[in-house]
Image: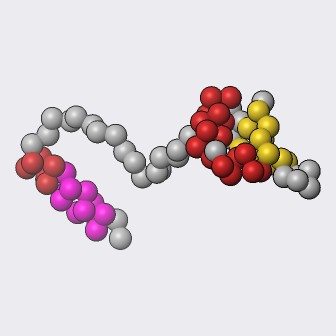
Amino acid sequence: MTVYTFSEARQHLASVLEQARLDGEVRIRRQDGTIYTITPTQPQGSPLDVGYVDVALTRDEVIAAVRESRERGLENR
């Protein structure tokens, strides 16, 4: 694992981040001895992201299904 001084990390931030990507983490040491660890993370997708589903329905079939669903919802009230 690579350890950078605070000054090195500040001057070469892009290189430090690339090293963290390659090695999994890097550390930065301040003059007072405090050490910080930088680790890359994977972007999190939204839980609302949905994939494409090919159901081969026509426009009219989709509209009919939506209407039927709405009617059932009103009946259950």
Q: Position of residue 72 (x, y in %)?
A: 27, 60
Residue 43 in the magenta stretch? The answer is no
Q: Position of residue 33 (x, y in %)?
A: 92, 50
Quarter of the figure that contains the N terminus: top right
Q: Quadrant of the C terminus?
A: bottom left
Q: Is residue 23 left or right of residue 45?
A: right
Residue at image location 18% in from the left, 59% down from the top: 67
Q: In the image, is residue 34 above or below residue 26?
A: below
Q: Residue at x 13, y 53 (%)?
A: 64
Identify which residue, 39 or 28, lies in the foreground: 28
Q: Quadrant of residue 20?
A: top right
Residue 37, percent from left and from top: 77, 44
Residue nearer the viewer, 46 or 43? 43
Q: Is residue 15 visible?
A: yes
Q: Residue at x 65, y 33 (%)?
A: 19
> Relative to residue 13, is residue 69 drawn left or right?
left
